[in-house]
Image (tube, rainbow, N blue to C red):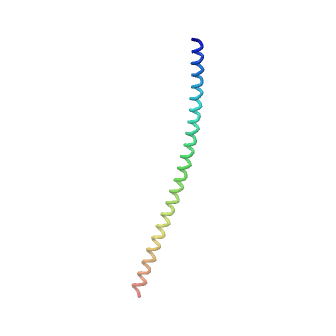
Amino acid sequence: MAEEFRKLANDSKDSSSQIAHMIRSIQQDIEKAKHSIHTSTEKVLTGLTYTDSVNTSFGHIEASISNVSDKAAEVDASS
């Protein structure tokens, strides 16, 4: 009977060690995931900034084209 208790205690100890190892591994994976999410978020924010800048530039281009078109129409009307 004592031998069975010793075996059970050893098995419990081994299981506890395996569980602790799994927990450490999961914690490391969580840290890696957090880092990846943070990096991805920064890249998305940078992309949004670039998109905003491009949108503003297209607005300026559109205004310039409209201005040139208006001037061309004035020249045409005065001829």
- Depth check: give the residue in front, 18 or 59: 18
Question: Is residue 7 positioned above or below 72 on the image?
Answer: above
**Residue 78 x, y percent position in the rendering:** 41, 86
For image coordinates 51% across by 62% down, the residue present is 53
Question: Is residue 13 positioned above or below 3 on the image?
Answer: below
Query: Looking at the image, which residue sits at the far left?
Result: 77
For image coordinates 57% across by 32% down, the residue present is 22
**Residue 30 x, y percent position in the rendering:** 55, 39
Question: Is residue 70 positioned above or below 46 on the image?
Answer: below
**Residue 15 x, y percent position in the rendering:** 57, 25
- Residue 6, quarter of the rendered image: top right
Count of marks, rendered view: 0
**Residue 60 x, y percent position in the rendering:** 48, 69
| In this rendering, position of residue 79 left or right of residue 2 | left
- Depth check: give the residue in front, 6 or 45: 6
- Depth check: give the residue in front, 6 or 53: 6
The N terminus is located in which quarter?
Answer: top right
Question: Is residue 67 positioned above or below 50 on the image?
Answer: below
Query: Looking at the image, which residue sits at the far bottom?
Result: 79
The C terminus is located in which quarter?
Answer: bottom left
